Image: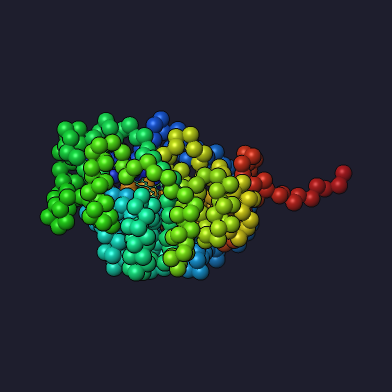
Amino acid sequence: MTIGDMGFYNIEDLRQKAKKRLPKGVFEYIDLGAEDYIALRNNRTAYEELKTKNRVLIDVSKRSTETQIFNNKIKMPYGISPTASAGLTNYGGEIDLARAAQRMGVVCTAATSALTPMEEIWDAAGGENLWFQLYMWVDKELRMKFVENIQAVGYKTLIVTVDGPVGANREHNNRNGYSMPLRYSPQLVSGILAKPGWCFRVLLKQYLKRGSFQKENYPEELNKKLTQLDLASGTKQIKPDMQCWDDIKRIQEIWKGNLLIKGLQSAEDAVLAAEMGLDGVVLSNHGGRYVDNAPSPLQVTAETRAAVGKDFRIIIDSGPRRGSDIVKALACGANMVMSGRPTLYGVAAAGEAGAYRALEIFYTEMDRIMAQLGLNSVDEIGPQIFWNPPDWVPQPKLGLKVAAE
Ligand SMILES: Cc1cc2nc3c(=O)[nH]c(=O)nc-3n(C[C@H](O)[C@H](O)[C@H](O)COP(=O)(O)O)c2cc1C
């Protein structure tokens, strides 16, 4: 029996299964956003608002979703965004994600705040398409040492996350008792006890194999500090400290591979990144988890492309749930699309097979919509696919010849 036969026909099916299998606090940590969820909803409506029109009578029998990123072949222009604590969805969830991506031939980004050490993720599925996401710890020396360690493990592409200089306002975490490190408050415990399957699959395995959940890539001294600060302030941030462009320059000096920054939402910042010689940017509003009034990255893609020119790499995340969303993002000027939640739902639903199923859904849907729109390759995707687009989308040039009267 294939996973598809078990009823996962779209990303929402995986989400519903994840909701059934995860404790309330863990599910809401993954699924919800900041404050009133305005950005979270807008991330979806921005995609849904765009209408595409088909072109007919085109031979699409040899079409392909394949493309390249940093000269490496990928099955489709889609990658897995970094997500902290993926190990809460399944024991070793980070490895499930990396293996699923490797099997599909797409990018996966391991996170600094993983519950599985970066070396184990690399050993399980290392390669050019396994990237690493860096959080800029306040302690600069520890951070630079960490960057060197990441390089020594073998990672070649580093994404530095630069949004969230202070902690996010996620009120649901206060209500359901979720925090990392986990604190077993009555609300959290009641959510956990309601999911005995999760207790065996995740909690018990974790305690038997690794001990309490912790950010495995953090040096011990920092993990301790983090725990104290978490307890004191109720925020995940180490402390509200400023990270600046100079810090990126310091990383640039020692990092030999590809370097990107993630979490910007403005063409102005993308221009600064391009001028600094970075290899690209990831436009992201963190999946609506930080600034509740942030635009969807999709809505700022076209203006960013116009500002940085055609050769600078723009990746966007936050909101894609269908293969057609990948096509829409590329038509707005992105080189690649990412998201974090769909494969996390997949891991929660069925481990590595569930994450793979999420990728398979994106692939099948992208392949189908390309055929339906009359597109044979990723290079053919452009604004001509839009019908009556809003003004934040590049306007199609129709090139119609009007018949003479
Ligand atoms: C549970 C969860 C944890 C996340 N942790 C991180 C993280 O540690 N570092 C980071 O740069 N982004 C993190 N993100 C943001 C994702 O990288 C990505 O920007 C977001 O998931 C995009 O939204 P989407 O998944 O709805 O498309 C996290 C997102 C989720 C859902």
State left or right for residue 270 relative to residue 213: right
Q: How many marks?
A: 0
Quick check: 351 above or below 387? below
Q: Quadrant of residue 205?
A: bottom left
- Determine whether, in the image, residue 37 is placed left or right of residue 327: left
Is there any visible trace of residue 205 in the rendered image?
A: no
> Percent from the top left, x then y, of residue 351?
27, 54
Where on the picture, by quarter, is residue 12?
top left
Q: Quadrant of residue 19?
A: top left
Identified at 76% across, 49% down, the residue is 400
Please state the horizontal and vertical placement of residue 96, each as a whole percent of the image. Answer: 29, 58
Question: Percent x, y for residue 179?
Answer: 25, 40
Look at 50% across and 47% down and name the residue there: 264
Q: Nearer the viewer, residue 362 or 213?
A: 213
Quadrant of the frame with the C terminus: top right
Q: 195 and 147: which one is in front?
A: 147
Residue at image position (42%, 45%) is: 242
Which residue is most to the right? 405
- As drawn, 235 above or below 156: above
User: Is 281 drawn above or below residue 287 in the view shown?
Assistant: below
Color style of the picture: rainbow
Residue 243 in view here: yes
Looking at the image, the residue that sits furthest to the left is 208
- Which quadrant would the N terminus be assigned to in this image? bottom left
Q: Residue at x 16, y 56 (%)?
A: 210
Q: Position of residue 113 (x, y in %)?
A: 31, 52
**Viewer-proximal residue, 373 or 358?**
358
